[in-house]
Image: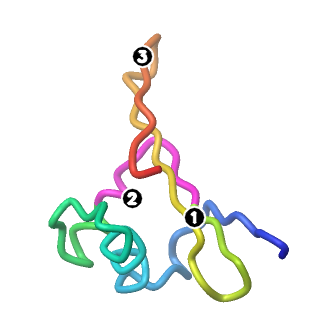
Amino acid sequence: MIIRCRTELDQVDRVALKRVPAADRFDSGRTPDECRHSFAGSDRAVVAFDGDQIAGTARLLSDGVCNACLVDV
């Protein structure tokens, strides 16, 4: 298994981005568009792929000074 990570979100399918946490019962209730907006509005975001399938995600929210929070892992 080779896992690739992508930080550019323009090529990530927003429906697939929503489907992964929903399948694991870790869904926040966001629509696919809201999920995409959440990732786009993060200080940093990464999507991990196993082949063409999303294997995981993570977002970093930061105040830019001393505090950060890792979410959607």
Query: Does the magenta-highlighted stretch encompass residue 27?
Result: no
Task: Identify which amino acid the numbered label 1 is placed on.
Answer: Val
Sequence-wise, the earlier of marks 3 and 2 is 2
Q: Which of 10 and 57 lies nearest the eye of the viewer?
A: 57
Residue annotated with mark 3: 67
Q: Position of residue 6 (x, y in %)?
A: 66, 66
Rendered view: 33 above or below 29: below
The residue labelled by disc 2 is 39
Q: CA distance from mark 1 to mark 3?
A: 22 Å
Do residues under tags 1 and 3 come within 8 Å of each other at their CB atoms?
Answer: no
Name the spot of residue 46 as percent of width and height, x first. Answer: 58, 57
CB under 8 Å between callouts 1 and 2? yes
Q: Is disc 2 surrounded by few (<14), some (14 to 19) or many (20+) residues within 10 Å?
A: many
6 sits left or right of 72 in the view:
right
Classify mark 2: helix, strand or loop: helix
Closest to the observer, 24 or 13: 24
- Measuring from the top left, give residue 65's x and y in whole percent: 45, 13
Between marks 1 and 2 in the image, the one whose residue lies nearer the viewer: 1
Residue at image mark 1: 47
Question: At 51% from the left edge and 79% from the top edge, which residue is drawn?
Answer: 12
How crowded pointer 1 is (Cα within 10 Å; few <14, some 14-19, many 20+) is rated as: many
N-terminal of the pair, mark 1 or mark 2, is: 2
> In the figure, 42 relative to 67: above or below?
below
The amino acid type found where label 2 is placed reads Phe
Q: Which residues are magenta?
A: 38-46
Q: In the rendered image of this protein, does residue 40 appear above or below residue 31?
A: above
Q: Give the Cα distance between marks 1 and 2.
A: 10 Å
Q: How is the image coloured?
A: rainbow
